[in-house]
Image: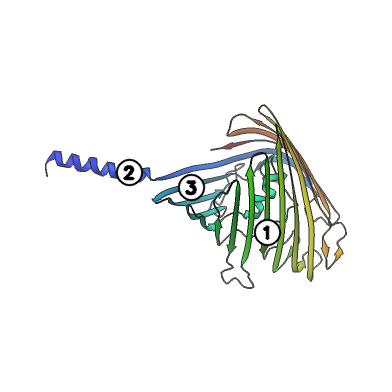
């Protein structure tokens, strides 16, 4: 083979590689979110220190398969931004998917769609992370071993159906999670339902259900939001009272507001969980209220400095942790 032929073959090989790479992409992304915080839980002494607020690193990518079909993946792992602690793995999010005009088919471990469509939208000040996260929402959903389908966008409407396999876990049950979301223009709303074998704080249960609804509206610089949730557990065990066989019900709601002034964001939200009812009887001291005030200053589109104060006024049953925390922090997205 002549020298000229070798050069031509090398150029053709490089062109082929470039064409293949042009059809696929991989992105490194993440969030580093750290606070200096003073917090106190119940009758314990207050603590001052650094805290990580759901910091993570992830990889996501897509490949164009032709004919409007794409393959994609997302791998995401959490780490402690305050001390660099692990262990680092992809239990936070691990997904492979196929998407096209039909919608998206997802396989793996990822957040419950019902939660994202309702409560996550309402916690605007710090995206439901850290000690100021919503402590009253009943996260009764399972996240792992899922298959899910997401519809295409129909004029701002999307829906998702998730099914989680118990994979022969002793006493296990399959789980379902459903969500409907609308987000176009100033009005937004979401509906969520889940049927899953997880429970409320202080209870274990072979079966739990929840339904929630969210409404948000933006008027100029002001955004208002609210959600309502009803949760029910069947044949639940009260861990603090060591009683079993009860049907447990609970209602919760949250209101939030955000006002934007230049690079500043002013936040306030309040949540309320009613008394837990077991077999129709209210549990004394099981109601709670959470207040949060927050301020964000956006240094750029990806970096903000912020502060917040949050307090959970827990009842005597202390179902949610009688918490008080004040924090200042920095969050950077990449």
For the residue pair 76 and 45, the one nearer the viewer reads as 76
| CA–CA distance in space, label 1 to label 3 | 28 Å
Residue count near mark 1 (Cα–Cα under 10 Å), binned few <14, some 14–19, many ≥20: many
Residue count near mark 3 (Cα–Cα under 10 Å), binned few <14, some 14–19, many ≥20: some
Residue occupying the far left of the picture: 2
- Measuring from the top left, give residue 131's x and y in whole percent: 71, 45
For the residue pair 33 and 114, the one nearer the viewer reads as 114
| CA–CA distance in space, label 2 to label 1 | 44 Å
Q: Earlier in the sequence, mark 1 or mark 3?
A: 3
Relative to 184, does residue 274 appear above or below in the rendering? Answer: below
Q: Give me the disc on residue 193.
A: 1
Residue count near mark 2 (Cα–Cα under 10 Å), binned few <14, some 14–19, many ≥20: few
Tell me what residue is drawn at x 62 percent, y 40 percent.
33
The residue indicated by pointer 2 is 19
The residue indicated by pointer 3 is 60
Q: Earlier in the sequence, mark 2 or mark 1?
A: 2
- Measuring from the top left, give residue 250's x and y in whole percent: 79, 59
Residue occupying the far front of the picture: 155
Q: Is residue 183 left or right of residue 212?
A: left
SS state under label 3: strand
SS state under label 1: strand
Q: Give me the disc on residue 183.
A: none
- Measuring from the top left, give residue 42's x and y in whole percent: 81, 50
Tell me what residue is drawn at x 70 percent, y 67 percent.
207
Quarter of the rendering occupied by the N terminus? top left
Tell me what residue is drawn at x 62 percent, y 54 percent.
113
- Measuring from the top left, give residue 256's x and y in whole percent: 75, 42
Q: Earlier in the sequence, mark 2 or mark 3?
A: 2
């Amino acid at each position: 083979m002549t020298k000229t032929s070798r050069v031509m073959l090398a150029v053709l090989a490089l062109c082929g590689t470039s064409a293949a790479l042009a059809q696929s992409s991989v992105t490194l992304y993440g969030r580093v979110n750290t606070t200096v915080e003073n917090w106190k839980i119940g009758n314990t002494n207050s603590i001052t220190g650094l805290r990580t607020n759901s910091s993570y690193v992830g990889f996501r990518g897509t490949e164009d398969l032709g004919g409007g079909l794409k393959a994609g993946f997302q791998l995401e792992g959490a780490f402690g931004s305050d001390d660099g602690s692990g262990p680092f793995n992809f239990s936070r999010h691990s997904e492979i998917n196929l998407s096209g005009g039909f919608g998206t088919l997802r396989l793996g471990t990822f957040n419950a769609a019902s939660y994202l469509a309702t409560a996550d939208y309402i916690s605007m000040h710090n995206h439901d992370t850290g000690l100021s996260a919503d402590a009253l929402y009943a996260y009764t959903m399972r996240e792992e071993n899922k298959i899910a389908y997401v519809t295409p966008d129909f004029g701002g409407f999307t829906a998702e159906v998730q099914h989680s396999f118990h994979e022969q876990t002793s006493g296990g049950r399959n789980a379902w999670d459903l969500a409907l979301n609308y987000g176009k223009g100033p009005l937004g709303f979401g509906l969520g339902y889940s049927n899953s074998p997880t429970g409320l704080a202080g209870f274990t249960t072979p079966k739990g259900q929840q339904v929630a609804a969210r409404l948000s509206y933006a008027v100029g610089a002001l955004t208002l939001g609210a959600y309502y949730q009803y949760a029910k557990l069947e044949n639940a065990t009260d861990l603090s009272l060591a009683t079993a066989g009860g049907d447990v019900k609970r209602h919760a709601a949250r209101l939030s507001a955000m006002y934007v002034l230049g690079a500043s964001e002013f936040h306030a939200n309040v949540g309320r969980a009613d008394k837990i009812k077991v077999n129709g009887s209210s549990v004394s001291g099981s109601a709670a209220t959470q207040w949060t005030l927050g301020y964000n200053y956006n240094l750029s589109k990806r970096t903000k400095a912020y502060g917040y104060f949050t307090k959970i006024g827990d009842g005597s049953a202390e179902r949610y942790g009688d918490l008080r925390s004040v924090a200042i922090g920095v969050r950077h997205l990449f």
